[in-house]
């Protein structure tokens, strides 16, 4: 099985250098690496060029694909359309594989289960052995389940591997979602198509989030609520969707109050959804 590793980059030279270095150390072959470059104005192009040459010497197909600036879901679909692998491995540019056998471990799961569509990676916080709580998207206690393998319908985009045919059968990511909840939408679509999703600590990556994100916390919460409503309305039967939407609004309102964001601003996102 050929794996395509897909990485999007915009003005994060030091982060993408660490990410690509971890990819170059992967033992698995055949391996293809596609770096989507969205018009960086920092040192990213030089860093990526050097990394591609290094990976080429290691027997890894590596190339840069220029792309316009777009939302997370759209950029991932854009990358997938340029990939030739049987498996698509998405990893954020501010993350890195924790060991050289990560992709070897991932392939074992797919060869052992033909109905397995996706493997969600364990995401560690920077250089620690602790799971990054920000990336824990599962309805299970982190302290109990982070080191256990389990079936799921959720995953985080920081790092995961998916069968290419399952990805396209489910329609890929929903382009309409600029940021947040695109994984929830795809996860529900895969389950609806009869595919299985698995979380496994056997495949781990390290997450090095930037001190300052591209959006403010308030903006992220608005996107999370708006997109969360849209996904529920799109994927869940209406009676259940209405109940879930009401619960989601209440939960997000309480979260915003704790974070001292404007609840009025947050609720303003509901009519937009």
Image (cartoon, helix red, strand yellow):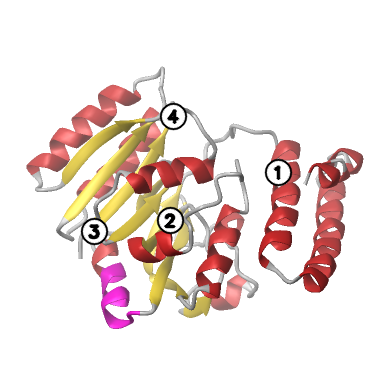
Question: Which residue occupies the extreme top position in the image?
Answer: 41
Element type where label 3 sits in the image = loop
Element type where label 1 sits in the image = helix
Asked whether residue 98 is in view, the answer is no
Q: Nearer the viewer, mark 4 or mark 1?
A: 1
Q: Which residue is mark 2?
A: 159
Q: Nearer the viewer, mark 3 or mark 4?
A: 4
Of residues 224 and 43, the one drawn nearer to the viewer in this rendering: 224
| Left or right of 219, for residue 204 | left
Element type where label 2 sits in the image = strand
State the CA–CA distance, disc 1 to disc 2: 21 Å
State the CA–CA distance, disc 3 to disc 2: 15 Å
Q: Indicate whether residue 111 is drawn in magenta.
A: yes
The boundaries of the magenta stretch are 105-114
**Percent position of residue 223, x then y:** 70, 43
Of residues 221 and 189, the one drawn nearer to the viewer in this rendering: 189
State the CA–CA distance, disc 4 to disc 1: 20 Å
Q: Nearer the viewer, mark 3 or mark 2?
A: 2
Q: Which residue is mark 1?
A: 223
Q: Which residue is mark 3?
A: 100
Specify which label sits upstream in the sequence, 3 or 1: 3
Specify which label sits upstream in the sequence, 2 or 4: 4
**Percent position of residue 17, x then y:** 31, 35
> Residue at coordinates 34% horizontally, 25% vertically from top-left?
44
């Amino acid at each position: 099985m050929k794996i395509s590793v897909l990485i999007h980059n915009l003005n994060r030279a030091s982060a993408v250098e660490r990410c690509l270095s971890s990819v170059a150390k992967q033992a698995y072959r055949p391996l293809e690496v596609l770096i989507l470059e969205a018009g960086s104005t920092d040192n990213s192009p030089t860093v990526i060029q050097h990394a591609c040459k290094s990976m080429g010497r290691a027997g890894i197909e590596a190339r840069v694909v220029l792309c316009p600036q777009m939302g997370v879901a759209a950029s991932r679909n854009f990358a997938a359309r340029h990939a030739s692998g049987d498996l698509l491995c998405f990893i954020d540019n501010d993350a890195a594989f924790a060991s050289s056998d990560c992709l070897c471990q991932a392939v074992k799961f797919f060869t052992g289960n033909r109905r397995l569509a996706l493997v969600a990676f364990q995401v560690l916080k920077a250089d620690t052995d602790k799971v990054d709580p920000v990336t824990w998207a599962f309805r299970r206690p982190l302290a109990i389940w982070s080191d256990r393998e389990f079936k799921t319908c959720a995953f985080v985009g920081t790092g995961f591997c998916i069968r290419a045919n399952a990805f396209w059968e489910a329609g890929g990511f929903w382009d309409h979602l600029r940021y947040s909840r695109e994984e929830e939408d795809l996860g529900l679509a895969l389950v609806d198509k009869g595919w299985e999703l698995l979380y496994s600590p056997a495949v781990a990556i390290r997450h090095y989030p930037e001190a300052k994100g591209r959006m403010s916390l308030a903006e992220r919460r608005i996107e999370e609520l708006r997109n969360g409503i849209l996904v529920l309305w799109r994927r869940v039967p209406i009676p259940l969707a209405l109940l879930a939407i009401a619960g989601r609004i209440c939960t997000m309102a309480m979260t915003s109050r704790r974070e001292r964001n404007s609840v009025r601003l947050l609720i303003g996102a509901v009519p937009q959804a």
